[in-house]
Amino acid sequence: MSERSQSFNGSEKHVQVIARPRPLSDNEKSQNLTSCLNVNETRREIIVNCKTSTTRFFNYDHVFGFQTRQQDVYKVVVAPIVDEVLKGYSSTIFAYGQTGSGKTHTMLGIFPIDKVSKDTVGAYMSMLESDAGIMPRAIHHIFQGLQRQYIDYTVKITFLELYNEELTDLLADPTNEQPEKIKIYEDKDKTNTIIGAIEAPCETPFDAFKILIKGAQRRQTAETLMNASSSRSHSIFTMTVTMKDAQGDVRLGKLHLVDLAGSENISRSGATDKRAREAGTINQSLLTLGRVITALISNEKHICYRDSKLTRILQDSLCGKTITSIIITLSPANEAETLSTLEYGHRARSLKIRPEINQLSSKDVAREYLDEIRRLRQELDAKREVDGIPYSQYITLKNQMTLVQTLSDNNQAKLNNNEQQIDQYRTEVDSLRQQLTTQQQDFRSEMNERKEMLALNRYRYDELVQITNKALTFREQVANTMQQLSSTHSTSSTLIEHYIKDCQSIGDSLQINVQRMTEDIRTMFSTCNRSVGQALVISTNIGQQIHMLNENVRAVLSLAFQNFHTIFEELNNVLNHFQTELERELRTLIETLVVDIKNDADNKKQAKLIHIQEETLIKMKTCFQELLASFGPSSQSLWVDLHTFLTQRFNQMSLIQISEKSTNSDYELLDLNIVRTKCLNEHEKQVFTTQNKLEELIIHLIDSVTNIHKTSDHKNTKLKNANLIQHIHNICTQHGHEIRQLLEIKLQSIFNQVRDEYEQQCGHILTNIERDTNQLNLILQDIGNKFDSSPLITNDSMTNLIKQSQRIDVMTQNLEYDWKKIKQSVDKFECETILPLAPVPMPKPDAVLKLELAIKDQQQTRLIAIENKENINDGTLLPTPIPISTRPATINVIPCRPKNDTPFF
Ligand SMILES: Nc1ncnc2c1ncn2[C@@H]1O[C@H](COP(=O)(O)OP(=O)(O)OP(=O)(O)O)[C@@H](O)[C@H]1O
């Protein structure tokens, strides 16, 4: 026994299901029918493109293409099964499908049947090259295998037909009017045996081939609308092979090839009357077959094999030890029937089988041979009675009987041996039983573990169901949200369209206004340019005149200072003269005093008096030199007048500040003022010091004279001292008065000279400057009036412009807000949704793209407008644009999103 056979033996398999669609027939093509099927041989998949529902997919153990050849079907599906039959297995191959789908084509095929009776060998040989189906090819395969592998074998064929629940032996003589009734007999062990059917022995493949053709020709056919040569019966072709190998092992192989009747629905088949009944009965068998299959799959206790003869005959093949395969044949143009067949096949795939080798015991073999002898004897008797026995046949029979006898003897000896072996086996069985008990215990504990696992899994399963339910609810919510989102989207799109239209119309009018205004401003600007040109010329003139004025003032002032210098020189001369005279007077006075003192008798007193007189003289000299400065107050008042006059003139000039030259003049004026202030300060200081010193001198002189007066007792001295004081006072008063008068006259003349000089040098320049300034002011005022009176640059038109711009801003902001909201909602939605695919970025609707373009346009236009405004604005004439951040957000010129608007989601 091969390795594969051993592994096959007793192990559980499922029924193999193979799908074979046929190509569209010429008839179908002429009716323009199309195929509803696609085949994927690699994935073993049949795809049904349903007209009414979604595409369906069916997988099988093997799937053939539309053009698969007969020999390939045989090679792939049947050859391995026949190999198993040759090892001693029973095997059944069904062909299931609607009428005309290719069951008979697959099972029997096409070959020159007519030739068989004339030249069986020739027909047989050419059959292998033709479109022959499974049956003839299996005959060839089996005989080849037997001859190669076994030393002895027998082959028997039965060929039955089941029609209207009636069994017919296709091998019986059709002319026999009372054919033997075929019955199905159930053994004690519930095995069904067919009684009354001819088991045709075949020594050669040609014999078997002849028998097949004979049976096939007898198959009853009836016409239906669907297929001109439709087979309306089930046919069961069985080959039973008994094989004996070199070791004397005998096996029994069985091959059932079942060509079932059409599986179609009666109403759809169009059958009527008798044919409808036929179809009903045929389908009764098929329905029972379906029910049996369903019951077997769902492990039902009662399986209704007995409900039809078909299921009774095939009982072994469906649940027993038989290798079972079903070939489902498919008509590509008929969607409904094809789907029904595919589903039938799919269900059948779940059927479990446990194939076992049919190893025959010696008793079985002996019984087989005895049956054979009995059969041969009957045949012999029959021949004798009718024709007498031909010698050749008699010899063959005798030889066969001798062979059978020898086999029987051998088997008896083997039987004895086997009984001894049985005892040994019994002992082995006992030890095996013990092993089994141990294994059962292990198995039970494992079972318990698995039960626990099962409970855990069930708990997890429940959890999973809950999660799934939640997920489903969530998916529904997601779907609803999606719907809302799409409706909001479309509403927003419409709104955005409106916004864009409004924006565009406002933008257009804004652009027109800005253009008109730009034009007007340009015209006005050129007019102003001319006026400003004139103003500039005048301003340059004024600058030049101021410069001249400054130069002249400087000249006048320097002249004045020179004159002052001369006056002071003259004044000094006068003072020197006065000083010399005073000194002379004093000397004379002192000499008079000294003469008086010399006359005094007291020498000590004389010396003291002389010292006091000398000291007094020196001090008086010094003091008189500085006394002249006491005339300061009158010169100071002149200085103040001059200062006031010049300051007023400078102030007049400093009112005119037009060009940068005026700035230079400021610096120059500053210089003059510094010089003047310096000069004045110096003079004041001098006068102040002299005054102090003179006061000091007079006090000292008075003190000295008083002292002398006290010290001397001389009457003359006392008298002379009083005269002296009076004399000094007189001199001082007289000369001081003279000097003051002189100074006042000199200064007044200088002052007059400076004023005249100033009037002459600067008066006309100042008049020119004043005139030019007035003209300039007139030009500037004119420009201002022009701007103020312009109808376009009125406050109203500017406010209008700004309003339009604001409207566009508000609309843009609203749109951006809407779009941002939609985006946020979509993002949020995508985040919250567990999608299997990466989130697809939401395509911007056309309206939004338009909007973005429009916003860009508007911004561009506004930029240009603002640039233009800035060009002409110059900070005074046009109102400055209001920045977006400070604009009021509630300009409801067009409908915009209200503030309390609820979010979309
Ligand atoms: N695979 C195929 N390739 C080419 N032709 C096919 C094929 N299968 C079937 N046919 C053709 O289709 C026609 C009907 O086939 P067939 O008689 O085998 O159908 P059926 O299922 O046996 O019908 P019924 O149930 O009536 O017996 C025949 O002419 C046959 O030659």
Image: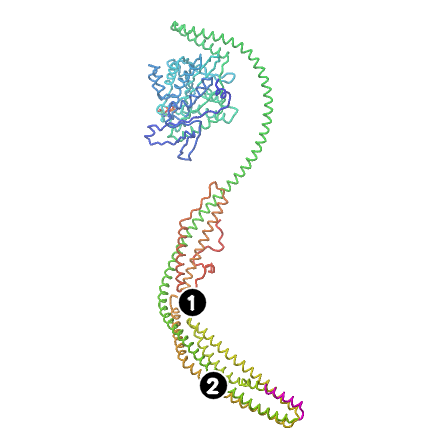
| Of marks 1 and 2, the one in the foreground | 2
Give SS at disc 2: helix
Per the image, is 558 magenta?
no
Q: Which residue is mark 2?
A: 748
Vertical side of 75 occupied by 609: above or below: below
Per the image, is 609 magenta?
yes
Q: Position of residue 767 (x, y in %)?
A: 40, 79
- Of residues 133 and 437, the one drawn nearer to the viewer in this rendering: 437
Query: Where are the magenta residues, as a range?
Result: 601-618
- Residue 198: tell me if it is visible: no
Residues under labels 1 and 2: Cα distance?
Answer: 53 Å
Q: For residue 40, which quarter of the picture? A: top left
Look at 42% across and 71% down and name the residue there: 660
Q: Which disc, if any, is residue 290?
A: none
- Residue 888: tell me if it is visible: yes
Magenta region's main secondary structure? helix
Vertical side of 814 occupied by 833: above or below: above
Q: Position of residue 188 (x, y in %)?
A: 52, 16
- Of residues 98 and 37, the one drawn nearer to the viewer in this rendering: 37
Q: In the image, what residue type sits under mark 1?
A: Thr
Q: Which residue is mark 1?
A: 876
- Of residues 184 and 393, the one drawn nearer to the viewer in this rendering: 393
Q: For residue 769, which quarter of the picture? A: bottom left
Q: Is mark 1 within 8 Å of ligand 1?
A: no
Q: In the image, what residue type sits under mark 2?
A: Gln
Give SS at disc 1: loop
